[in-house]
Image (tube, rainbow, N blue to C red):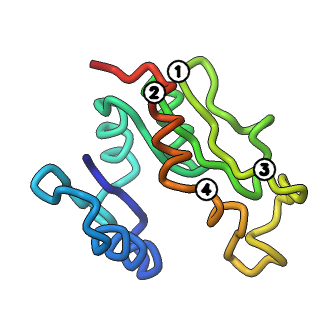
Amino acid sequence: MVLTGAPVVQEQQLVADILSNGQFDEKHLVNLTGQLTLKQLAAIISKARCFIGVDSVPMHIAAAVKTPTVALFGPSNAAIWSPWQVSHQVVRSRPSCQPCMQKGCGNSGWSECMDRISVQDVTDALSQVDVVG
Protein backbone atom coordinates (compact mmCIF):
# COMPACT_ATOMS: atom_id res chain seq x y z
CA MET A 1 0.00 0.00 0.00
CA VAL A 2 1.23 3.47 -0.87
CA LEU A 3 -0.03 6.55 0.96
CA THR A 4 0.28 9.93 -0.68
CA GLY A 5 -0.73 13.45 0.18
CA ALA A 6 0.22 17.07 -0.21
CA PRO A 7 3.29 18.56 1.49
CA VAL A 8 1.20 20.43 4.05
CA VAL A 9 1.07 19.95 7.80
CA GLN A 10 -2.66 19.08 7.85
CA GLU A 11 -2.28 16.18 5.42
CA GLN A 12 0.89 14.91 7.06
CA GLN A 13 -0.92 14.94 10.42
CA LEU A 14 -3.90 13.12 8.93
CA VAL A 15 -1.63 10.38 7.58
CA ALA A 16 0.13 10.14 10.95
CA ASP A 17 -3.27 9.75 12.64
CA ILE A 18 -4.29 7.04 10.16
CA LEU A 19 -1.06 5.14 10.74
CA SER A 20 -1.26 5.46 14.51
CA ASN A 21 -4.50 3.48 14.77
CA GLY A 22 -2.58 0.23 14.25
CA GLN A 23 -4.82 -1.13 11.48
CA PHE A 24 -2.06 -1.19 8.87
CA ASP A 25 0.89 -3.52 8.59
CA GLU A 26 3.65 -0.95 8.16
CA LYS A 27 5.93 -3.62 6.64
CA HIS A 28 3.70 -3.50 3.58
CA LEU A 29 3.17 0.25 3.52
CA VAL A 30 5.07 3.08 1.87
CA ASN A 31 4.32 6.61 3.05
CA LEU A 32 5.16 9.13 0.32
CA THR A 33 3.12 11.99 1.76
CA GLY A 34 4.58 15.31 0.66
CA GLN A 35 7.39 13.72 -1.34
CA LEU A 36 6.05 13.47 -4.90
CA THR A 37 5.71 15.77 -7.85
CA LEU A 38 2.46 15.56 -9.79
CA LYS A 39 4.25 13.64 -12.55
CA GLN A 40 5.65 11.12 -10.03
CA LEU A 41 2.23 10.75 -8.43
CA ALA A 42 0.67 10.04 -11.83
CA ALA A 43 3.32 7.39 -12.54
CA ILE A 44 2.61 5.62 -9.24
CA ILE A 45 -1.15 5.78 -9.76
CA SER A 46 -0.77 4.32 -13.26
CA LYS A 47 0.94 1.24 -11.77
CA ALA A 48 -1.48 0.79 -8.86
CA ARG A 49 -3.89 -2.14 -8.64
CA CYS A 50 -6.51 0.27 -7.31
CA PHE A 51 -6.77 3.91 -6.24
CA ILE A 52 -8.76 4.92 -3.14
CA GLY A 53 -9.20 8.61 -2.51
CA VAL A 54 -11.40 11.67 -2.41
CA ASP A 55 -12.74 13.66 -5.35
CA SER A 56 -9.47 15.35 -6.32
CA VAL A 57 -6.83 15.63 -9.02
CA PRO A 58 -5.28 12.25 -8.08
CA MET A 59 -8.70 10.57 -8.40
CA HIS A 60 -9.10 12.03 -11.88
CA ILE A 61 -5.57 10.92 -12.79
CA ALA A 62 -6.49 7.39 -11.70
CA ALA A 63 -9.53 7.40 -13.95
CA ALA A 64 -7.55 8.87 -16.86
CA VAL A 65 -4.90 6.14 -16.66
CA LYS A 66 -7.59 3.45 -16.21
CA THR A 67 -6.65 2.50 -12.65
CA PRO A 68 -9.68 1.00 -10.87
CA THR A 69 -10.96 3.61 -8.44
CA VAL A 70 -12.89 3.94 -5.20
CA ALA A 71 -13.86 7.61 -5.02
CA LEU A 72 -15.06 9.22 -1.78
CA PHE A 73 -17.43 12.12 -2.32
CA GLY A 74 -18.61 14.72 0.16
CA PRO A 75 -19.57 18.27 -0.82
CA SER A 76 -18.91 17.84 -4.55
CA ASN A 77 -21.38 16.43 -7.05
CA ALA A 78 -20.69 12.77 -7.82
CA ALA A 79 -23.14 12.89 -10.73
CA ILE A 80 -20.80 15.36 -12.46
CA TRP A 81 -17.34 14.49 -11.13
CA SER A 82 -17.35 10.67 -10.78
CA PRO A 83 -14.66 8.67 -12.57
CA TRP A 84 -15.71 7.33 -15.93
CA GLN A 85 -14.47 4.78 -18.45
CA VAL A 86 -12.81 2.82 -15.63
CA SER A 87 -14.01 0.27 -13.08
CA HIS A 88 -15.04 2.38 -10.09
CA GLN A 89 -17.30 2.77 -7.10
CA VAL A 90 -18.45 6.03 -5.55
CA VAL A 91 -18.72 6.16 -1.76
CA ARG A 92 -20.75 8.88 -0.07
CA SER A 93 -22.87 9.17 3.04
CA ARG A 94 -25.84 10.80 1.26
CA PRO A 95 -26.97 13.50 3.69
CA SER A 96 -29.84 15.65 2.45
CA CYS A 97 -27.51 18.62 1.93
CA GLN A 98 -25.24 16.76 -0.49
CA PRO A 99 -23.95 18.04 -2.84
CA CYS A 100 -23.58 21.43 -1.20
CA MET A 101 -20.45 22.42 -3.15
CA GLN A 102 -19.07 24.20 -0.07
CA LYS A 103 -15.59 23.88 1.39
CA GLY A 104 -16.93 21.99 4.36
CA CYS A 105 -20.06 22.50 6.43
CA GLY A 106 -20.66 26.23 6.52
CA ASN A 107 -17.37 26.65 4.58
CA SER A 108 -15.53 25.50 7.73
CA GLY A 109 -13.10 23.16 5.93
CA TRP A 110 -14.68 20.14 7.74
CA SER A 111 -17.44 18.08 6.14
CA GLU A 112 -19.77 15.94 8.21
CA CYS A 113 -20.66 13.99 5.08
CA MET A 114 -17.02 12.91 4.73
CA ASP A 115 -16.75 11.98 8.42
CA ARG A 116 -19.79 9.73 8.03
CA ILE A 117 -18.02 7.53 5.47
CA SER A 118 -16.83 4.45 7.33
CA VAL A 119 -13.94 2.11 6.69
CA GLN A 120 -16.56 -0.57 6.06
CA ASP A 121 -18.18 1.61 3.38
CA VAL A 122 -14.82 1.85 1.60
CA THR A 123 -14.09 -1.87 2.05
CA ASP A 124 -17.50 -2.75 0.63
CA ALA A 125 -16.90 -0.50 -2.38
CA LEU A 126 -13.45 -1.97 -2.93
CA SER A 127 -14.97 -5.46 -3.14
CA GLN A 128 -17.18 -4.20 -6.00
CA VAL A 129 -14.32 -2.84 -8.14
CA ASP A 130 -12.50 -4.95 -10.72
CA VAL A 131 -9.03 -4.63 -9.19
CA VAL A 132 -6.07 -5.16 -11.51
CA GLY A 133 -3.96 -8.29 -10.94
Q: Earlier in the sequence, mark 4 or mark 1?
A: 1
Q: Amino acid at mark 1?
A: Ser
What separation in Å lies between label 4 and label 1 (alpha carbons)? 20 Å
C-beta proximity under 8 Å, tags 2 and 1: yes
What separation in Å lies between label 3 and label 4 (alpha carbons)? 9 Å
Which mark, residue 87?
1
Q: Which residue is mark 4?
A: 117
Q: Amino acid at mark 4?
A: Ile
Disc 1 is placed on an element classified as loop
Residue at 36 percent across and 68 percent down: it is: 18
- Measured as percent of width and height from the top left, residue 129 is found at 48, 25
Label 4 CA crowd tier, 10 Å (few <14, some 14–19, many 20+): some
Residue at 40 percent across and 50 percent down: it is: 38
Callout in the foreground (4, 1)? 4
Q: Amino acid at mark 2?
A: Pro
Disc 2 is placed on an element classified as loop
What separation in Å lies between label 3 and label 2 (alpha carbons)? 22 Å
What separation in Å lies between label 1 and label 3 (alpha carbons)? 21 Å
Q: Which residue is mark 2?
A: 68
Instruction: Please tell me whether residue 51 is drawn above or below residue 53 in the rendered image.
Output: above
Instruction: Please tell me whether residue 65 is drawn above or below residue 75 in the rendered image.
Output: above
Residue at 30 percent across and 40 percent down: it is: 44
